[in-house]
Image (tube, rainbow, N blue to C red):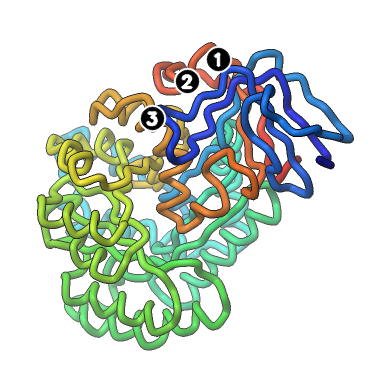
Amino acid sequence: MRCDRIWRNARLATLAPGRPGLGEVPDGVVASLDGRITYAGPAADAPGLDATEIIDCEGRWITPGLIDCHNHLVFGGDRAAEFEQRLAGASYEQIARAGGGIVSTMTATRAASEEALVAAALPRLDALIVEGATTVEIKSGYGLSLEAEARQLRAARALGRRREVTIRTTFLGAHALPPEFAGDADGYIDLVCHHMIPAIAAEGLADAVDAFCEGIGFSNAQTRRVFEAARANGLPVKLHAEQLSNLHGAALAAEFGALSADHLEYLDEGGVAAMARAGTVATLLPGAFYFVRETRLPPIELLRRHGVPIALATDCNPGTSPLTSLLLTTNMAATLFRLTVDECVAGVTREAARALGLQDETGTLEAGKRCDLAIWDIERPAELVYRMGFNPLHARVWGGR
């Protein structure tokens, strides 16, 4: 079999469906051709491989490249002052209702040029890449006008031209109510549905549409309108749901076949069952849980019992999760939510790919998928979850390079 590169003498965590655990292979080989995996499995079963380059991994572990399936990487300014307010006792909701929160970031984002947004986001993206991230989703949601939302999405797309990483963009115009629509949430949703979504879709700036279904965000009925507009414009949906209360957003997301419902601290069993039926991924965001000092845990056992796939993500954003480490995210998920090592590693690879609708493209080591790899100086996969503030990445491979 002809290939351009072979990684040999490696231990693999293939994450392939149907294999126990992480699909471990103790003496494995990965081969690629033109950026695609042609073989990933035991060395003893490998076909005759003829490669231009052979890399000896010297017993290191190879996993799929990591995937951050929920973040808000592109924004202007910061919210360190709000962090101090929370330390003094103010709640996230109190800060938002006083004009802080998302709206304060909106002001800074609207004032920033596309190039300024790119320059500010690059160090955050680099922090993810240096830990093995090969695919990153980036949401808008801090412009809250068509011009500013489009600028955010263009900046996100530009990041993918500056770095060797796959960028997926999500339009989150229904993130908060901009000041010019104060007291008129339905009027703003009219703008999102009738003008913003069609324009964003026509320009090809978004791969999905998201919304914030919450008491300080938008109602279930308003979110439904956003989803209907997304469907009319051929875009899949995702949802910030059940973070601070239960508005049954997850069940609504499932009704529309959403790729994922995210946060989910207040999710009930009816919502879990609806997600299971629809194949909607539960994306958990332990960074936000930690940062805002939440106390209500997502219903992990219900998700397991109903077989809902669990993804993990940084939720990198300036107000509630200024986190740019997927490795620390897995440690938080294990420590705070009691996820297993296998669930954590799958959550930032296979299930994160599923949460982006990319399960046929990446997230596992299988023939035909993109050759996106993370090669680790570790003795066992548990080290990826166990350590804090330590990066054992030896090499990152994106599209076979």
N-term-proximal mark, 3 vs 2: 3
Q: Nearer the viewer, residue 187 or 78?
A: 187
At a point 70% along the width and 51% down the height, the residue shown is 162
Distance from the alpha carbon under mark 1 to that under mark 3? 16 Å
Q: Which quarter of the image is occupied by the N terminus? A: top right
Q: Amino acid at mark 2?
A: Pro
Residue behind mark 2: 381
Q: Amino acid at mark 1?
A: Ile
Q: Contact, CB < 8 Å: mark 1 with mark 3? A: no
State which quadrant residue 305 falls in.
top left
At a point 42% along the width and 47% down the height, the residue shown is 78
Residue behind mark 1: 378
Q: Contact, CB < 8 Å: mark 2 with mark 1? A: yes
Q: Amino acid at mark 3?
A: Thr
Circle 3: element type: helix
Left or right placement of residue 268 versus residue 154 in this view:
left
The percent position of residue 159, horizontal first and vertical second, equals 63, 54
The percent position of residue 160, horizontal first and vertical second, equals 64, 55
Left or right placement of residue 90 versus residue 340 in this view:
left
Residue behind mark 3: 330
Distance from the alpha carbon under mark 3 to that under mark 2? 12 Å
Circle 2: element type: loop
